[in-house]
Image: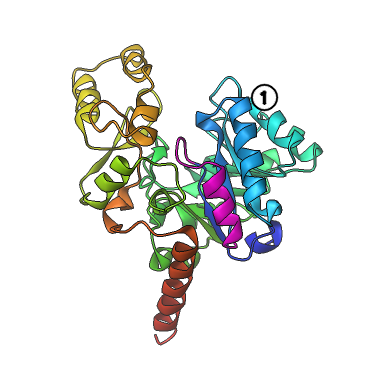
Amino acid sequence: MKTITTLLPIKYPIIQAGMVWVSGGKLAAASANAGILGVIGAGSMKPDLLAEHIRKAFSLTNHPERLAVNVPLLYEKSKEQLETSLKLGIKIFITSAGSPKIYTKWLKEQGAIVIHVTSSPELAKKCEEAGCDAVIAEGFEAGGHNGREEITTMVLIPQVADAIKIPVIAAGGIIDGRGIAAAMSLGAQGVQLGTRFVMTAESSAHQNFKEAIKTSTPNSTMLMMKKHVPVRLLRNPFFDEVKKLEEQAAGVEELIKLLSHGRAKAGMLEGDMINGELEIGQGCSMIRDCPTVEEVVNKLLSEYEKTISVLEKF
């Protein structure tokens, strides 16, 4: 079995998640420079804007081979996003929110590496059958779009690792080096962190959003909109609107109508803490700082080594 650091041209087995409105070219380039996989989140970008961010990332790093693009397949322009990325030299793709069978074979024919996000062992098997090079097994704790199965990371990772032969990358609730050590002990060969990289100097998250994360508590988030596309949200007045609709047994159409006003952009990118949608992982309450990506990576590695040294004494 290939390890993540042999499959991917990275120094450390860490992936910076490609999050909507947060993971632009600046964050991806900083991650690549720090020795990990830097991912541009295409979910919030039209193809022309995605092209701008890819070019920006290339201009800010000496390690373009460490750049990837995350393309959620539920969007109508996903094929265009993939084509745009390929034309500009991207060779690593993380696909999510759709069947791995749609584009994996085609991408691999273009010489690309394909990693698909999964939330269950059953879907992980389908990813392997579809020809994916690795999977990201994302637990219920994660922010953004989440699995309907609500399987937690600690339960999900060992089951996925037992079910498939391709590398498993753990995601969901991993915030520090202790979480990385735990994921590796459960059978993962690498980790993906999202929430921790939202809280970096290079992320595109609005300062209002970052300040709200700094003051969050363990019960500040909840998985919502399960009838539409499950997403973990930070509590705010928009969250209350969603919760009220769901308590009234609102249909998918009503939820889509509520979301149709650019709520995610308003909240995460523009800092509207009243009307904006704030997607974030359950581990947000463990973060109280906003350092550079390089500082985050160095701290993660230090915490991981410290945790491993403690475990070795048992």
Sort mark 1 into few (<14), some (14-19) or many (20+) by Cα contacts within 10 Å. Answer: few
Total tally of numbered discs in the picture? 1
Q: For residue 34, what is the image quadrant? A: bottom right
Residue at the (27%, 47%) spot, across then down: 211
Name, please, the residue furthest toward the bottom: 313
Task: Reply above or below: 283 against 314.
Answer: above
Q: Position of residue 105 (x, y in %)?
A: 75, 35
Provide the secondary structure element on which disc 1 rests.
helix
Closest to the observer: 247 or 292?
A: 292
Which amino acid type is shown beneath numbered disc 1? Glu
Closest to the observer: 293 or 83?
A: 293
Residue at the (39%, 82%) spot, across then down: 310
- In the image, the segment drawn in magenta is 19-35
Q: Position of residue 26 (x, y in %)?
A: 54, 47
| Residue 21 located left or right of residue 84 | left
Q: Which residue is mark 1?
A: 80
Closest to the observer: 117 or 235?
A: 235
Residue at the (70%, 62%) spot, across then down: 6
Residue 168 located within the stretch drawn in magenta: no
Residue 25 located within the stretch drawn in magenta: yes
